[in-house]
Amino acid sequence: MNHDLEKIISGLKLEEKASLCSGLDFWNTKSVERLGIASWMMTDGPHGLRKQKSDSGQVGLNDSVPATCFPTGAGLASTWNRALIQEVGEALGRECKAEKVGVILGPAVNIKRSPLCGRNFEYLSEDPFLAGEMATHHIRGVQSQGVGTSIKHFAVNNQEKSRMLIDAVVDERSLREIYLPAFEIPVREAQPWTVMCSYNRVNGTYSSENPWLLTTVLKEEWGHEGLVVTDWGACDDRVEGLKAGLEFEMPGNGGITDRDIVDAVRAGTLEEAVLDGALKRILELTFRVLDNIDPEARFDREAHHRLARRVASETMVLLKNEGSLLPLAKGRRIAFVGAFARKPRFQGGGSSHMTPTFMDDALAEARRIAGSPIAISYADGYSLESEASDPELLAEAKKVASEAETAVVFIGLTDRIESEGYDRTNLGIPKNHLDLLEAVLSVQKNLVVVLSNGSPIEMPWLDRVPAVLESYLGGQAWGGAVADILFGVANPSGKLAETFPARLEDGPSYLNFPGEKSKVEYREGLFVGYRYFDSAHVKPLFPFGHGLSYTKFLYSGLKTGRKTLKDSDTLSVSLEVKNSGSVRGKEVVQLYVRDLESSVIRPMQELKGFEKIELEPGETKTVEFRLTKRAFAFWSVEQKDWIAESGQFEIAVGASSRDIRLKTVVELESTASVSRVWDQNACLRDLLDLPDVGDYVRDLMGKFRGVFGSYEPGSAEAAMTEAMVTEMPLRNLVRMGGGLVTREGLALLLDVLNGRKPARALK
Ligand code: BGC
């Protein structure tokens, strides 16, 4: 439908305009009946619809209408399957439509800077490219149904501690290369209808009133056409927010901040045109939502539950499988121990906590798959009510495990340990889970650990456990999916979207998390996750990208379309992958780029491509990637742009960041004109390679060396003199050169360097 927004806006009174800039209540927008503007609803997200029941209190964290609970973000990212995430998005969109929800709050894409962040279970990855790609497909899926998304939390919301106040102090390159691209990629590729600004400050300014973030970067550079909405309660100064590019405040506050807007316009401190600009975006979204409402919309609960099971089985990461203990052989006596097997932790705590439509029971599903005459015995092993061990439950679990041929132990993290609102303080699991594992280990060597957790844990017991399945927080069909994986009905194909450190202390943010006095400095800079572990050669417990399968994949024939390229070219890369095992399986082929010659500090390698393929036994497929300039570039702080420098780049392809199977090198030629302004603090060294002045400078350096005396070639003194001279700033040619260069001479050299005079002027 066509709506004449200008006309509508000009028909609104100032008070009405201001009132449309914030919500009616916790979830709904305001209406202006006279102009046909109806109220509509936005609600959580991200991995299932949490539509609060009308009678469940203001915040209503627990009481929501039943909807399909898909695995949380940590698991969804571990699928590395773009098409599957899009399917999840489509299903979420259908459910929103059926529930008359206009925007679902998600995906949540903040980078996993520390494994301790309480919301890591909701977030996607430590890698911005992977997070950005998965978010793009999530958004495309939801929005294909005529329902909006709200990518969150923009930006640099990487901890729960002091989340509403904390000032995240991040250098420009790390912002551009690590913390922003997970938003940038989906904004450019999928245009989320809304972007949710974060609670925290970024380099001193709240995200909700940060003009650089909301206008310069989001709207002007990336071209976001939708609305910026606050996180719930993220607004600090409403008027500054509007000026900075924040259109909409949630939740409603009874008109308190609407009055601030009216007063500011009347006082002349806020131009009405700024308000009108915000209203245009608000009304565009409003009519987009209203035009898409379909009173007839329904969704198929059973079909969505089946999808949730399929998705959950792809989220699970087989971390270890010694002696091919998995899949479980039919015909063996198996024991399931651990209360999570019956009452799984399938989602996280906080705003994403929702009410599922169905709940799978892992034990029942496993018994169904294994079939008669197999009996799967079961014991709780621990209580879900406490972290203290219960000797009786432990004794029972020990007995059950000792009578079986294989034991499957279900342990992990509880809601109390891991939730929105606070961070973890260590990588441990509850004592009663650990005691159960030890009890079973004392009687059973054939042991499979199934982990339910939203973020990495430490595993001091790993050497004694032959098989570990990381099942993350798998949503309502977790039980069925676990059974599918354990018995080989599904072949595991998840890969870690985050590094599992051996010890918390090994991680790059360990010394600066969660900060102090409402400030956290991101001193590790670019070196987040595998970018640190790989660059510093620190061995992780499990590396980024790791995940085993019940089959094997062979990589061969890595080729690039060309060996030399310009940064404006697209480089095609291809290879062959063969399933050399005996079952069908999916492999995530990962492509990492390494800059072999760089003028700036860069991570050892960075993920720039990935493809998930499915192969029948014996089948071979060609996997293709296309790399553009961004795959080679870093953010230049001087040039305020992405720069791919001339030189060699290694293209490495593998099954994880630490399991590189094939490599090749290409030569890149930059088209960037690096226009440096030369001054008296430039170094002699920097001038050596300049074609016009190189010879002149070499000659000058020779003479300058003489000023320091002449030493035996190869001696320590000669080496020291050489280093001093090459590192010398130009100003010291005048001051320490004993008349070698005059002030006028230096001025002439700078004129030549800066192109004001021709090189021959130096002769
Ligand atoms: C969370 C958001 C959520 C919002 C609404 C906030 O506390 O940070 O992720 O969408 O509440 O529930």
Image (tube, rainbow, N blue to C red):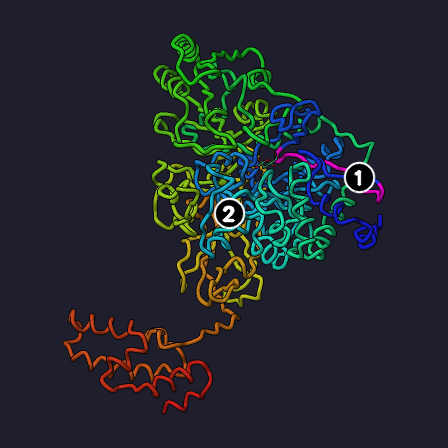
Question: Residue at coordinates 69% horizontally, 48% vertically from top-left?
Answer: 262
| Residue 186 in sight in this render | yes
Q: Is residue 35 magenta?
A: yes
Q: Is residue 678 above or below residue 35?
A: below
> Which label's residue is closer to the chain start, 2 or 1?
1
Q: Secondary structure at mark 2?
A: strand
Q: Position of residue 498 (x, y in %)?
A: 47, 40
Residue 462 sits in which quadrant? top left
Disc 2: which residue: 201
Q: Secondary structure at mark 1?
A: loop
Residue type at mark 1 is Ala
Question: 383 left or right of 47?
Answer: left
Residue type at mark 2 is Arg
> Which of the numbered marks, if any, corresponds to residue 106?
none
Q: Residues within 10 Å of mark 1 (few under 14, many from 20)?
A: some
Instruction: Report the number of numbered marks.
Output: 2
Magenta range? 34-47
| The one of 527 and 495 positioned closer to us in this rendering | 527
Question: Residue at coordinates 42% horizontally, 18% vertically from top-left?
Answer: 387
Disc 1: which residue: 38
Question: Residue at coordinates 31% horizontally, 74% vertically from top-left?
Answer: 729
Q: Position of residue 109 (x, y in %)?
A: 56, 43
Residue 434 sits in which quadrant? top left
Q: Is residue 194 magenta?
A: no
Q: Is residue 363 above or below residue 354?
A: above
Question: 467 left or right of 562?
Answer: left
Q: Quadrant of ligand 1?
A: top right
Question: 258 left or right of 6?
Answer: left
Q: Position of residue 479 (x, y in %)?
A: 57, 22
Q: Position of residue 145 (x, y in %)?
A: 74, 40
| Residue 592 in sight in this render | no
